[in-house]
Image: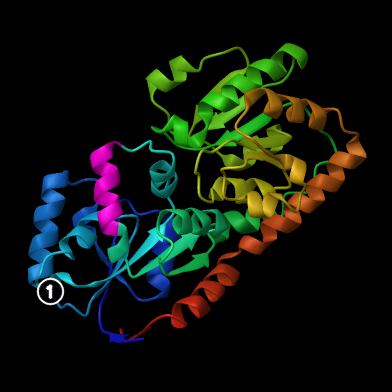
Amino acid sequence: MSKYINICFLFYTPHPFHKGLADAIGAWDLDILSKKNSPFKRIFLYLKYALNSSSDDILLCEGTFLIPSLFKLLPIKRFKKTIINISADPKLFYIKIKRMNFLERLLHRLAIPNVDLFICIGNMVKDLLKEVYPKAEYIVAYPFIDEERYKYLLNIPVKSEFNHNILFIGNGPDYYYKGLDLLVDAFKIVKKEVKDSELFILGNWSKEIREKFNYEGINFIGFSDIYEYIEKSSLYVHLGRGDTFPVSNLETLLGGMPCIISEYTGTKEIIRELGEDFILPLESRKVAEKIIEYFNLSTDEKIILSLKAKELGKRFKKGIVIEDFIKKWKGWVRYEI
C-alpha cells in the first residue's frame, strides 16, 4: 500500500451513486472526460492535466479508464498514475459477447491491465472481470438508494390488493443493454392472455424507440413520480444484458414490489433470496410464463413476496452501503486529503 495526496474523480455524468462514492473518499471532481466533451477533446484535456499533475495522483474513474490507462503505456512518469475504475456499465459484458467492434475490444484489452483496482458494483461484474482479466485486483461494492427516496419508499405500506400491471424503469439509448426488446416481446405474450395487463416504462427514451416498441397496453411515461407507478403496478421486470446493479430494481424492492429479472442483471444475487425462479434466461416466452404464473398466485402468496421484497430493499440504505465501501477501500489504499 502507498500513501497518496490527490484523488481525482473523472466522471462521465456523473451518476449520483458514483458521486456518493467519490465524496466519501474525498475525491475532487474533474470533468475533462465527461460526455459533454468530444473524444478528441477528452484526449487533449487529459494530456494537459497529466503533464501538469503528479504521478502520485489517484484517478477514480466512472468507467472513464480507457484514456488514462492507454496513456499509462507511454514511458512518461506523470502518466503512471494509480487508476481505480468504478465498473458499473456493460463494457465487460460487451467484451465477453463481442458486442464491441474489434478496435474497441483491442483498446480495452490493452487498457484493462493498467487499471490498479476495479470497484465492481456487485458480484456479476466481479465474475465478468475475472473472465476478461483474471489478474485484476478488485473490491465489490453496492449502490445505495437516495436518502429521501429511501425514506418515502420505506413508508409505502405492503400491498393488500394486486392488479396485472408491470413496471420497468430505465433510460436509453441502449435498449439492448436494458433488455427493452425482450420485455416488450414478453409483454405481448402476457397481453394475449391477461387482457387488462399494462406495462409502464419510466425513463428517457427517444421517439424512435417509443415508436419501435409501440403496442397496445405499453405506456412510455418518461421521467415521472416513481411512487405513483409503484402503487399502480404489482410486478417489476428487468431483463438486462449485462446491467450491473440497477438502482431502480432496489427502489422497487423497497417499495414492496417483487421483481423478475434476467440472469444477466446483477441484482440476481439479491433476487435469489426472493426465489430462484424469479431469475430467468434471456427468453421472452419463459419470462411471460413466469409473469402469468405470478399473476395467478393467491393474494396471501403475493403479500408474502411483497414483504420479502421490502426486507431485501432495506439493505441499500446509504449509510450502510458507504460504511461497507469505506472498510474495503481502506483495506486497499491509504491517502491524505
Compared across the picture, whether 323 is left or right of 100 comes to: right
What kind of colouring is applied to the model shown?
rainbow
Residue placed at 29% from the left, 51% from the top? 108
Q: Where is residue 122 in the image (x, y as percent from the top left)?
A: 54, 58
What's drawn in magenta, residue-wise?
101-111
Residue placed at 12% from the left, 68% from the top? 50
Q: Which of 46 and 164 is in front in this view?
A: 46
Residue placed at 68% from the left, 16% from the top? 189
Q: Where is residue 42 in the image (x, y as percent from the top left)?
A: 15, 52
| Quarter occupied by residue 114 | bottom left
Q: Position of residue 315 (x, y in %)?
A: 66, 63
Q: Quadrant of the N terminus?
A: bottom left
Residue at which label 1 appears? 78
- Give the secondary structure at mark 1: helix
Q: Can residue 188 be seen in this view?
A: yes
Residue 289, placed above or below residue 84? above
Q: Which of 210 and 334 is in front in this view?
A: 334
Q: Count up the numbered dots.
A: 1
How would you classify the magenta stretch by its main secondary structure? helix
Task: Please state which amino acid type lies under the numbered disc 1.
Answer: Arg
Query: Magenta segment: does it hold 279?
Result: no
Residue 71, placed above or below residue 334? above
Query: Magenta segment: does it hold 104?
Result: yes
Q: Which of 200 and 182 is in front in this view?
A: 182
| Quarter occupied by residue 287 | top right
Residue 144, placed above or below residue 90? below
Q: Quadrant of the C terminus?
A: bottom left
Q: Where is residue 256 in the image (x, y as percent from the top left)?
A: 74, 47
